[in-house]
Amino acid sequence: MIASKSLVSKLLVVVVCMFGFGYALVPLYDLFCDITGIGGKTGQIEQVVAAQERIDKDRVVTVEFTSVSTSGLPWEFRPEKNKLKVHPGEIYEIMYFAKNNSSQSVVGQAIPSVTPGLASKYFNKTECFCFTQQTLAGKEQKDMPVRFIIDPDLPEDIHTVTLSYSFFNAQKYAQN
Amino acid sequence: MSSTAEHHHDDHHHGPAKGFMRWVTTTNHKDIGTMYLIFSLVMFMVGGFMALIVRAELFVPGLQLVDPHFFNQMTTMHALIMVFGAIMPGMVGFANWQVPLMIGAPDMALPRLNNWSFWILPFAFSLILSGLFFFGGGPASGWTLYAPLTLQGGIGVDLTIFAIHMMGISSIMGAINVIVTVFNMRAPGMTLMKMPLFVWTWVITAFLLIAVMPVFAGAVTMVLTDRHFGTAFFDPAGGGDPVLYQHIFWFFGHPEVYIMILPAFGIISQIIPTFSRKKLFGYESMVFATAGIAFLSFIVWAHHMFTVGMPLAGELYFMYATMLIAVPTGVKIFNWVSTMWRGSMTFETPMLYAIAVVFLFTIGGLSGLMLAIVPADFQYHDTYFVVAHFHYVLFSGAIMAMMGGVFYWLPKWTGHMYDERLGKWQFWLTTIFFNITFFPQHFLGLAGMPRRIPDYNLQFAEFNFMSSVGAMGLGITQLLFIYIIYKAVKGGEKATTEVWEGAEGLEWTVPSPAPYHTFETPPVVK
Amino acid sequence: MFRPLGNKLLSILVGLVSVLMTNAAMAEYALNLPPPVTSTAEEILTLHNLILLICLIIFVLVFSVMFYSMFAHRKSKGAKAASFHHSTTLEIVWTVIPVLILIGMAVPSTATLVRMEDTTESDMTVKVTGYQWFWQYEYLDDDVNFYSKLSTPRAQIEGREEKGENYLLEVDREVVLPIGEKIRFLFTAADVIHAWWIPQFGIKKDAIPGYITESWVRIDEPGVYTGQCAELCGKDHGFMPIVVRAVTQEEYAQWVAENQAPSDSTVSSANQGEELNAAASVATN
């Protein structure tokens, strides 16, 4: 019976650990995505400075911009232009236009995604409206800038990078 | 031989208590095993009824019987009930009855826990079913409960999540019980490598359960807090990630598939040697193949989600790893066929079932191999090809193995031989209707019919018609299954101690029916 | 006992045959993947046929051994059980051979997959957004933007009218695409996960909210190609078809000219925004 008890407690420890592991998958997955770029989440600001010192004037990469204003967010939302030809290592700015079509104030959160996924960690933003929640009062409209830089280490076979923003209604998650 | 079992200690003289309270308070592994098996059968009929609603709606093109939302509830609950209500508790029922008998233990190691783990189940499944009566109905986002669709559901989803917690606890307690029993209660001389293969497959299954049920519990808890408590694990609006849910779910979901099939392999590995009158071929390699399959199940999960847009390297890795599973699975099939080779075979109902499982499961296994090929998977994914695949694996694998197991051990459990003629009828009807139901679904999937749709284009009409006819036959045949069991419980030809001519193992050394208490003095295994 | 059952089976068979006959003109009894119209789908079909063939050969070999054994080694024929239960040689053989077969399957699969995932150097880009329960198409290079919804009348679904040939596979606005060009698709969704699938193109990709994923096609032949949403997305998951009309490049250019958004795009997208939200709210009710 003593043997049983110690075995049972060991097994229970495994159970608890595996429950924790389920939760640990959340940060582990983020980490994994950062390393491999799977999630299409864009790169970190810290990398920008280093990238800037190596502007690659010979190389041209096409950056495409798209947008989605998701269901439940009564906003109009689009980039000022569809594409831009850029040199890796140089900083560019592009404006996104947003307008609240409803008469109430709404909090939104933009979620960026880059494809191909492998390009995402070479896509660095110095300024973005996606860094924080955005609030638009009823009928308010706004131009929002994104400033970005493509890392010169972007793999040679990538010629086009697409940046997409999905704007979600984040009223539920509003930070006051 | 039977004298061992008939020798009672004084304090155990009374036998089972009488009436309803016997079943509520029992800690006897045979009582609890019986309850699990009956529960599983009831859930099998409930889940089967839901499948018939699905098939009835799909009988001809157009919406006739149910609205699409109710249709989605039926497909979702059919799967949840079959997976968690019919197959898993059914296998636990077999484990409760057979593991102590096979290793010469007087009972499970933790009898009171055993009682608890059973009695949680009826409440858990009442909770799932009660969702149907609330506003918004039961869960309707598929048994995989993918976010963000699950975040939209009604209160039925919350009830399902609580039910999953409860049955998760039940499964984990059951698994702990099996492991402790096998490690601590084996009869003298019963070394690990002498254990019957059914016991081995169950130990490995139990470890899988302990490893992945908590992960699933975590995943649905995250869904619950996303729904009601302001977290955003999977809700993109709050910075969550819907694909993360799929990763966590399938980290549980793939081992879960083996949780359902490994004990079935165990049952088959008991039946085939008995009716071939020959020892199981390659016992050691069977054990290692089982362990190998269990290990691989942890590293292949993303093959369920090739279409989410993984990078090439990820797709290639999961394709190769998944293809590898064919190797240990193949070893098992070859071993079973070699066991039959130059045996002295007879074909009673359990053997018919075992052969059908080997044959039909292999169809499911090979279509599984086809699904592993990523480019081809892009065509098969989320179509009826997949529906056909997993029914070949789970119905003609797990369920039919359990039916074979019931016929195999029923004489030991009840003391009466079942009606062999009816048994054969039930077998042939089940097998034929099963194939009429599911084989055409391969063609439907290839032709382009997505799964989980309540209505379809006319080009899919013929095969759907065929499939629905088969399903009705398959459903009705199971009433015969219940009748055969009922008849054997009530009476019939007396079963001998050995029951089957070629049977080997400790369970065939106790009288039929197995007395309430067995192996109170441990048998000695040479 | 057998006769009545046999009769019943026969009558079911007769019923089936009659169903078949009545629909024969309309539907081929499709047993395999539909005819491919892109190189990707073509390669997938070849791969599918190859692997199916290998699986069938293995299946027949293994089970001819089993059925021979069931026939020859039965007790009723006086077979005595042998006592062997182990053979290291055999076990090595049937581990190694499957590994070799698997490698043989993996090589062409990998080659096809690498080609499928190469979206570079495309001629045009179409962004596809999944909604509950319709699709939005944006031609990023040509300024065309529209929604595409099921157009099958309710009466057909509810059986008050005869079902047409394209029942549930017809939309109010078809996606028009040029043949011969490498078309890159971007996929995303506005609410839950959907999946965009056209069997004859050989592409199926999830459209996930907050994510953008990509795939490509090059269509060989003009024609109308249909598909459906392939990821459960709620109540009307079965009612959001995809219809692509592939046309020559000249016809495509003409179609673009006719469908381009007016120059004052602010007004038009504002309208679309309202239309979209109206549609979404109708859908959730």
Image: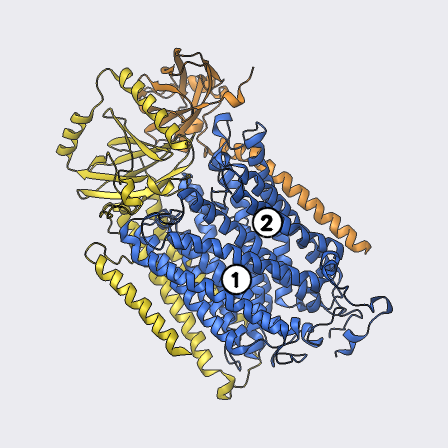
Looking at this rendering, what residue extends furthest in the front direction? C160
**Which percent across, then down, holds residue C90?**
50, 71
Amino acid type at circle 1 is: Ile
Looking at this rendering, what residue extends furthest in the bottom direction? C78
Is residue C3 shown to the viewer in this render?
yes
Q: Secondary structure at mark 2?
A: helix
Pointer 2 residue: B125
Label 1: chain? Answer: B
Chain shown in yellow = C
Pointer 1 residue: B399
Is residue B270 shown to the viewer in this render?
no
Label 2: chain? Answer: B
The colour scheme is: by chain
Chain B tint as drawn = blue
**Which percent across, then down, holds residue C285?**
41, 32
Q: Nearer the viewer, residue C249 or B256?
A: B256
Task: Please tell me if label 1 and label 2 are on a single chain.
Answer: yes
**Quadrant of the image occupied by residue B262:** bottom right
**Which of marks 2 and 1 precedes in the sequence?**
2
Quadrant where the C terminus of chain A sits is top right
Chain shown in orange = A
Q: Is residue C145 above or below residue A140?
A: below
Q: Residue at x 37, y 57 (%)?
A: B441
